[in-house]
Amino acid sequence: TGAVPFTGAHQAGIVTPAQDRLHFVAFDVVTDDRAELVEMLQAWTAAARRMTAGQDAGEVGAVGGGPYDVPDDTGEAMDLPAAGLTLTVGFGPTLFATADGVDRFGLADRRPGPLTELPAFPGDALDPAISGGDLCVQACANDPQVAVHAVRNLIRLGAGVVSVRWSQLGFGRTSSTSSAQATPRNLFGFKDGTDNLKAENTSAIEKFVWVTDGDPGADWLAGGSYLVTRRIRMRIEPWDTSTLAEQEQTIGRTKKAGAPLGQRGEFDPVDFTAQVDGEFAIPQTSHVFLAHPTNSGTAILRRGYSFVDGSDGLGRLDAGLFFIAYQRNPETGFTQVQRNLRTDAMNEYVQHTSSAVFACPPGVTGDDDWWGRALF
Ligand code: HEM
């Protein structure tokens, strides 16, 4: 129920212990006027500052004005606490130049090299209507109404400047981003986030998450991070007809404890040389084998959420994992891991249906600072 500080060297919502709920939204910018875009980012920052502190989006509030004023807050979070709300903003490659190469805002030469559309991966079934975006906001909170309220008010403030391209609700965090948190389970029923990068491991976070001086785009992006989202449909019906042994061999960990196969405890070290009856305890086609830094050569901060978006009209739930990863460079982060997952036994049970990449600027510091100031 507490408030997460909005200001700081880094944006909140990245290494912040993952909250339970997500409302993610990607926008198209519909104006060509740079000043309008800047004004909106300033208005968003002011509203985000207030809402993350548990206040109304505007100073007057939902009911503080006169009966003939349009309220500057929509009201549905009026009696609710901050609920750990974080709002994290990101800029997509198309903000810097459209797919046809049009530089609407004079930003083309500020685009950091790594901020390009992700490459195609085998098995992708991406729907362009729910992929990409010029801007994004990740709203996380422990109360879904608080997250939805925040996104709704940013949309309201952005009228005429941005329009919603796509949005995704998530429940049940599928990662821990702090060692103080218990590991949750994803919709396959497995603990997810055991071997994630954790906030307490500051040297790994510095190395793998934050853009640093000397990196491309560091003049405005240092202290920021790249965000990759992938909406991953999980084929839960075939998964639910597979045996426990098949499921554990697919993941590479036990279902109950989340221990690496061949070990007992969740946090026992992963040992890829351990053998049982002459076979590797952790199969080389398992998700954990292929995703582990020993074999992928890198690490990412995972911060995803489960989703169930109704059903697909064919008698199946439209369910899965809205995968979110933060990294210092998408090429040596998500892309490198995902390429290594091409032989993952789990691929039989998942399909990626949307994809997006954004550069998230550093945190807002003083009272006059605003999201992306160093970029504009
Ligand atoms: C680990 C599930 C997609 C990267 C894990 C674990 C589970 C899991 C159960 C083991 C527990 C843990 O250490 O967190 C899933 C499911 C996915 C999915 C259900 C899709 C629906 C992905 C994708 C990537 C990824 C797309 C990146 C491209 C990782 C990494 C680890 C991991 C880096 C840690 C491996 C280690 O260090 O041992 N995942 N995952 N996962 N996953 Fe995934």
Image: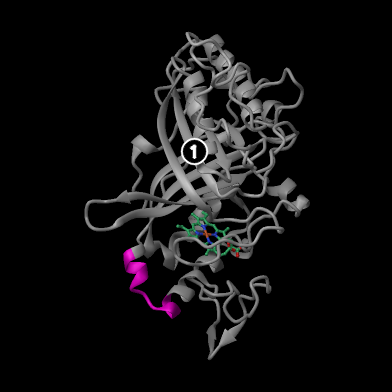
Q: Is residue 71 left or right of residue 268?
A: left
Q: Secondary structure at mark 1?
A: strand
Q: Residue at x 61, y 23 (%)?
A: 47
| Magenta-drawn segment | 237-246
Q: Of all residues shown, which one is farthest toward the front?
A: 67
Q: Is residue 120 magenta?
A: no
Magenta: main secondary structure equals: helix
Query: Where's residue 23, x and y in %?
Result: 49, 39
In the displayed structure, 77 sits above or below 228; it is: above
Label 1 packing within 10 angstroms: few (<14), some (14-19), many (20+): many
Which residue is found at the position 47% from the left and 34% from the top?
25
Residue at 62% across, 49% down: 18
Q: Please give the count of numbered marks on the rendered protein.
A: 1
Q: Where is residue 75 drawn, in percent x and y? A: 51, 27
Residue occupied by mark 1: 24
Quadrant of the image containing the C terminus: top right
Whether ligand 1 has any atom under 8 Å from the Cβ at mark 1 is answered as no
- The image's colour scheme reads one colour
Q: Is 298 above or below relative to 5?
A: below
Q: Nearer the viewer, residue 88 or 4?
A: 4
- Would you place residue 324 above or below residue 242 in this image? above
Across and down, in percent, residue 299 comes to 63, 54
Q: Establish if 194 lies above or below 306.
A: below
Tell me, yes or no, whether the highlighted magenta stretch contains residue 239: yes
Q: Residue furthest bottom?
A: 277
Q: Amino acid at mark 1?
A: Phe
Looking at this view, is 13 or 276 the one in front? Answer: 13
Q: Is residue 136 visible?
A: no
Residue 184: x, y in percent?
57, 61
Specify whether residue 271 is in view.
Answer: yes
**Where, by quadrant of the figure, is residue 343 drawn?**
bottom left
